[in-house]
């Protein structure tokens, strides 16, 4: 036996495994973590839509359940009449576990042992995302396929696009995850083999003469196993691989292949022209639009205060008598309508429009709440829009810009109304909103500018394609 050759190989093997372990921790595993997060985002979009259509009934006790490890939901059969509740409970359990994986599980070689990898691979296979079929042999996949088909049958084009995009992203993410986990599993086998080499074969009591014979070599490992590898399983297949790498006449070939497999993939550096992320540009516009919520919150408070000032002027004795008789005879209070002077921004022409205060206030409040849900990156509202195709997002932005421009005109008229319709003695109590209106206008201009930049870039790319120019 060539001692120096074995020593060199042992040193090379340890260095290769340590280096590959660092590579997994810094490169591959963070990517798997991000893929799981992408899957979770897509899953929540699907669950939200299935719940809206009453196709599933989410587990009402979901928030009370705490988990500390990866486990798979039940996959036993159930009747069609139980589908909504059973699938709702199981997909809720799946979401909770997926949330645990994304936010609490450590993605490292030390943590992701073979047992944990097997559990993750089993979990990833709870639903056959790549081929959801109503003919599936598994109850969960079969039920989910039915519900998704029902949802698609009644979906509008935008929802249909969102669903297709969510399913595609989930399928791609899980494909990357499964490939990465299988690769990591092979690496963990090599770490197991290295432990055997370090703790057993390099042990001073290990017979050096056994290296001359494969059978004797394996027998010697078994002899020292209990004392040197307590509580570790004896993996016969992997022990045989070690024997081949240490005693086989072709051991040099086995060793060379092993070191090659443990080498770090080289990053191919390809110089590319700067690529503009058009989708991210649109999402910048979404976040900019969402920032309107702060201005509308202040506007809501001010017009509420102004409305109260105006109402206080109609609390005379006769007003109270009239209200008493309305209540007595069960008649509704008169609607709180405001006659606003709307000024056309293009022609400066003026016209009178009737605005119902309560309806307008409720509508603006809902708009404010919605914008607050899309203003923060990775929030549920933001993620839902992020899943859509670029043309759908652009159409959404154009409609919002038009709606808010119209709203800006109404708020300008309402601000003037409060200032002119209150009694002179109360006008000092009226709170103006000109500052907020200016900020709202600037936000709309910025949002429109981002949309225009996106459109200009897309048009430029189309023109270059027509000319046969490929950057």
Image (cartoon, rainbow, N blue to C red):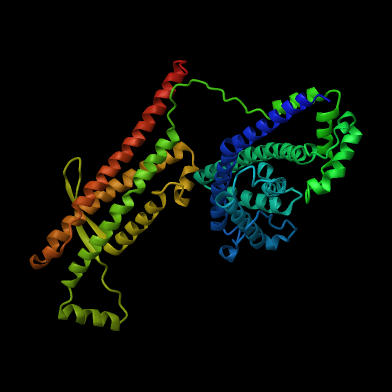
Q: Is residue 65 above or below residue 69?
A: below
Residue at x 69% of width, y 28% of height: 12
Work out whether residue 243 or residue 409 is closer to the camera in this orientation and state it: 243
Image coords of residue 276 (percent x, y): 42, 29
From this viewpoint, which residue is outermost toward the top? 468
The answer to whether 50 appears left or right of 333 in the picture is right
Work out whether residue 409 or residue 248 is closer to the camera in this orientation and state it: 248
From this viewpoint, which residue is outermost toward the bottom? 328
From this viewpoint, which residue is outermost toward the front? 204
Residue at x 34% of width, y 33% of height: 452
Q: In this view, does 250 lie above or below 59?
A: above
Image coords of residue 115 (percent x, y): 72, 48
Image coords of residue 285 (percent x, y): 37, 40
Residue at x 64% of width, y 45% of height: 110
Work out whether residue 180 or residue 160 is closer to the camera in this orientation and state it: 180
Residue at x 41% of width, y 40% of height: 283
Q: Is residue 310 above or below residue 315?
A: above
The answer to whether 233 appears left or right of 298 in the picture is right
Q: How many labels does the image show?
A: 0
Figure quadrant of the N terminus:
top right
The answer to whether 139 appears left or right of 158 in the picture is right
Image coords of residue 180 (percent x, y): 65, 38
Which quadrant of the view contains residue 24? Answer: top right
């Amino acid at each position: 036996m060539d001692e120096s050759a074995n020593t060199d190989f042992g040193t090379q093997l340890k260095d290769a495994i340590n280096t590959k372990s660092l590579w997994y921790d810094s490169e591959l595993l963070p990517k798997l973590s991000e893929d799981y997060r992408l899957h979770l985002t897509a899953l929540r979009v699907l669950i939200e839509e299935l719940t809206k259509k009453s196709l599933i009934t989410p587990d009402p006790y979901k928030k009370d359940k705490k988990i500390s490890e990866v486990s798979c939901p039940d996959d036993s059969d159930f009747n069609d009449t139980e589908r909504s509740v059973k699938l709702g409970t199981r997909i809720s359990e799946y979401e909770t576990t997926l949330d645990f994986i994304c936010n609490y599980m450590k993605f490292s070689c030390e943590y992701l042992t073979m047992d944990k990898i097997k559990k993750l691979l089993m979990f990833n296979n709870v639903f056959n995302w790549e081929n959801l079929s109503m003919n599936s042999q598994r109850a969960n996949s079969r039920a989910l396929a039915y519900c998704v088909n029902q949802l698609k049958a009644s979906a509008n084009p935008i929802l249909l696009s969102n669903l297709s995009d969510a399913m595609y992203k989930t399928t791609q993410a899980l494909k990357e995850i499964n490939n990465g986990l299988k690769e990591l599993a092979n690496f963990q086998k090599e770490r197991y083999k290295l432990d055997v080499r370090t703790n057993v074969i390099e042990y001073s009591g290990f017979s050096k003469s056994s290296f001359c014979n494969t059978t004797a070599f394996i027998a010697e490992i078994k002899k020292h196993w209990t004392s040197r590898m307590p509580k570790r399983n004896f993996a016969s297949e992997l022990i045989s691989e070690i024997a081949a790498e240490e005693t086989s006449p072709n051991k040099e070939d086995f060793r060379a292949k092993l070191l090659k497999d443990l080498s770090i993939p080289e990053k191919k550096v390809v110089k590319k022209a700067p690529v503009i992320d058009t989708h991210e540009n649109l999402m910048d516009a979404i976040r900019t639009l969402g920032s309107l919520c702060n201005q509308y919150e202040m506007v809501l408070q001010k017009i509420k205060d102004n409305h109260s000032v105006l109402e206080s002027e109609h609390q005379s004795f006769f007003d109270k008598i009239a209200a008493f008789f309305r209540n007595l005879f069960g008649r509704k209070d008169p609607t709180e309508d405001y006659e606003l002077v709307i000024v056309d921004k293009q022609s400066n022409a003026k016209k009178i429009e009737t605005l119902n205060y309560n309806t307008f206030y409720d509508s603006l409040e809902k708009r404010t709440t919605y914008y607050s849900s899309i203003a923060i990156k990775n929030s549920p509202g933001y993620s839902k829009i992020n899943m859509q195709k670029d043309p759908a997002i652009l159409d959404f932005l154009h409609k919002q810009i038009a709606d808010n421009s119209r709203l800006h005109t109404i708020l300008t008229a309402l601000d003037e109304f409060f200032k002119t319709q209150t009694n002179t003695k109360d006008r000092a109590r009226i709170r103006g909103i000109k500052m907020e209106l200016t900020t709202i206008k600037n936000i709309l201009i910025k949002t429109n500018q981002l949309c225009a930049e996106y459109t200009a870039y897309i048009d430029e790319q189309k023109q270059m394609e027509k000319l046969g120019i490929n950057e």
